[in-house]
Image (cartoon, grey):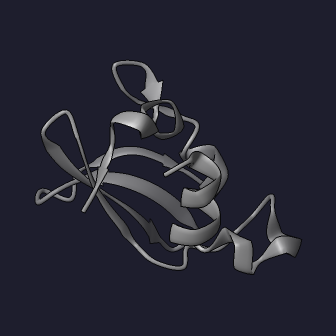
Amino acid sequence: MTWTEFTQEVLGWGQFPDSKETPPLTNETLFYCEGKQYMITQIGERYLIVSQPEFKTIVESNSYPQLLEKPFIEGKSFHELFPHIQLA
């Protein structure tokens, strides 16, 4: 799966072409990276990547696209790590 397929189909950003800068969170995403489980979620106006099952905030942002570009494991972002991420 490519990054574009992931953002457009799995995250549903393709359904909101007028909201490229601020696409909504259409579904929470569970994923594994380096043997640990994480979830992309939203609380109020904040978008977060949290560890599972602890629900500990790893990284957060007020912008969903920016969240996926912020470093969260060994200085790398979700986007950078995407080829190594396993979706749950």
Q: x and y percent of residue 22 in the render?
A: 75, 64
Instruction: Please give the count of numbered marks on the rendered protein.
Output: 0
Quarter of the image for the C terminus: give it: bottom left
Q: Quadrant of residue 21?
A: bottom right
**Residue found at x 11% / y 60%:** 53
Residue 25 lies, in percent from the top left, at: 55, 73
Q: Is residue 70 above or below residue 28?
A: above
Res 74 → quadrant: top left
- Identify the image quadrant of residue 14: bottom right
| Residue reaching furthest to the top | 74
Q: Residue furthest right?
A: 18
Nearer-the-camera pick, 38 or 35: 35
Q: Is residue 83 above or below residue 12?
A: above
Residue located 64% across and 45% down the image: 66
Left/right placement of residue 5 relative to residue 15 reads left
Q: Nearer the viewer, residue 82 or 59?
A: 82
Can you give x and y, in whole percent of width and height, for residue 72 in the image? 39, 32
When the figure is inspected, residue 83 is found, relative to residue 14, above or below; the finding is above
Position of 35 with respect to 55 (left or right) is left
What residue is rendered at 42% in x and 36% in y?
83
Q: Position of residue 81 (x, y in %)?
A: 42, 32
